[in-house]
Amino acid sequence: MLEGYCGEAEALAMKLLVAIGDVFDARRMIKVKSVQVSGISYKTIGEAGVEFLEDFCSKGAKAAVETTLNPAGMDLTAWRRMRVPADFARRQLRIISAFKRMRMDITCTCIPYFVGNRPRFGESVAWAESSAICFANSVLGARTNREGGPTALASSITGRTPLYGLHLDENRKPSHVVQVQSELSTDLDYGLLGYALGRKLGHCVPFIEGTRMTRNLDHLKTMGASMATSGAIALYHIHDVTSESRLIKQSDLHFLERISIGKSELLSAKEELTSAENPRHVCLGCPHCSLEELGKVAKLVHGRRLRRKLWCFTSRKTYEEAEELGYISAIKAAGGVVVRDTCMVVSPLEKIGVEQILTNSCKAAHYLPSLSKVEASLAPFEECVEFASRRS
Amino acid sequence: MVPGRAAGRAVVTSQPISFLGGVDPVTGRLIEKNHELKGMSLRGKVFVFPYGKGSTVGSYTIYSMAKNGVAPAAIINMETEPVIAAGCVLAAIPLVDRLERDPTKTIGNGDYVTVDSKRGIVTVRKR
């Protein structure tokens, strides 16, 4: 492949993977079952990213394995209603067209595991999107390193990834024990725990214990997203909850460094992430809202008239499923908006007149001030919806 | 390591870096809220930090910085990770990690640092 017998794009992609393999002393390449590519929004990759993708595309690059995409910078059909500027939209559509030509699935979501790209236990994949990586490794027990946008793309084209890091058993064992000394009830509690943990440990494989931990997939989704924002955590274990925890013996934990996280750490994480004093918009869906979450919004707003703007971000596929169940019409009837293909982090919020938001997402609250000059403040999922319904 | 040779003044932090949302690809300055180096320019510097964190789009940010002429001259990590490494490969920025001594403690801000990543040699001239 490297010699170019399989094509120019394949050779270029393999060259990148070999260089990465060299950095990490990988012994060889392995096949991957699926790929999740990040860097889809024009907002995040800019002109240099567009040229990079179009260059690959013009060399004849094609997906060799199942490949799904991260969110784009706008709802690909309703972008005018979102008030996305036309020049941004033009560039965004160029990016999408390149991915289409490379035969990748235009899923545009950060929760590929809820829309059909769901690797099985023990399978090696090459995923980008920090939150999805955490979910794939921890909850599903699949194996992926923290792929960057370009290496995920290269793995899609070649169907390969270098064998190192989290593809190997020895690197998946816990490195730290985290004792949680606070009760966790809302989704935001789990988000804050993840954020505090990532901040404290940065780069490790935590084993989390100490309190009754959730099995709710949306809570695990948000916790992983936070850990992978404040830190570089790609895999965590929770006793009796995550897929590999049954392989971990108590004796494996004896000599590990122990840290504890309690109420005060959660509070200081919340304080650190709060910058909006007077939010006018409520944004949910970072990571994207699941079908269950859209159902929850529909139930909470049923028969009410929203007083503030409520935007729920989700994938196109989830939107269609929610439409069939009547969730979308219920949210719309109350005055809420369900946006597809994008989210508050990667859409040009600053260009569509958003200044301060209330959200349940620690990840969004972390990125928005620097990425979009939008200030954020945090509340649990239900309270966010409640806030949008209140008069003042 | 990503092979290459480069030299420049050091910018050092003990905090991990997410290039997306952490660095402005047009100006080359650190923009992450609450980061100890907020406002510092990375252009032409030898950037020393423990490891990458956060967004996997960071590789494109590093690549964009190079295209805009504001990329660091070299990167030194304690232990690097794929998002940073891919950015360095695409942007041809020399990268070294796993050195004998902790670079975030041994190298000071403003030190003149030479990196020869192929031979794994980093020399530091104290400011």
Image (cartoon, coloured by chain):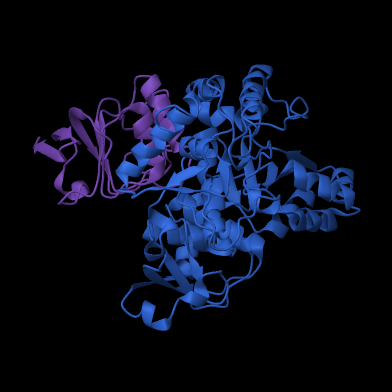
Mark count? 0
- Tell me if residue A40 comes above or below residue A388 in the rendering: above
| Res A135 → quadrant | bottom right
The quadrant the N terminus of chain A occupies is top left
Location of residue A272 in the rendering, given as x and y in whole percent from the top left corner: 47, 52
Location of residue A196 in the rendering, given as x and y in whole percent from the top left corner: 45, 60
Decide if residue A112 is on the left or right side of residue B30: right
Q: Which chain is blue?
A: A
- Tell me if residue A97 comes above or below residue A22 in the rendering: above
Decide if residue A2 is on the left or right side of residue A290: left
Residue farthest front in this picture? A5
Q: Nearer the viewer, residue A21 or A333?
A: A21
Decide if residue A147 is on the left or right side of residue A299: left
Q: Nearer the viewer, residue A98 or A236?
A: A98
Location of residue A321 in the rendering, given as x and y in whole percent from the top left corner: 82, 49
| Res A310 → quadrant | top right
- Tell me if residue A329 comes above or below residue A261 in the rendering: above
Q: Nearer the viewer, residue A29 or A56?
A: A29
Q: Is residue A123 visible?
A: yes
Residue at 54 percent of width and 58 percent of height: A123
Residue at 76 percent of width and 54 percent of height: A291
Residue at 23 percent of width and 50 percent of height: B98
Q: Which chain is purple?
A: B
Q: Is residue A309 visible?
A: no
Residue farthest bottom in this picture? A251
Location of residue A44 in the rendering, given as x and y in whole percent from the top left corner: 53, 31
Residue at 19 percent of width and 38 percent of height: B109
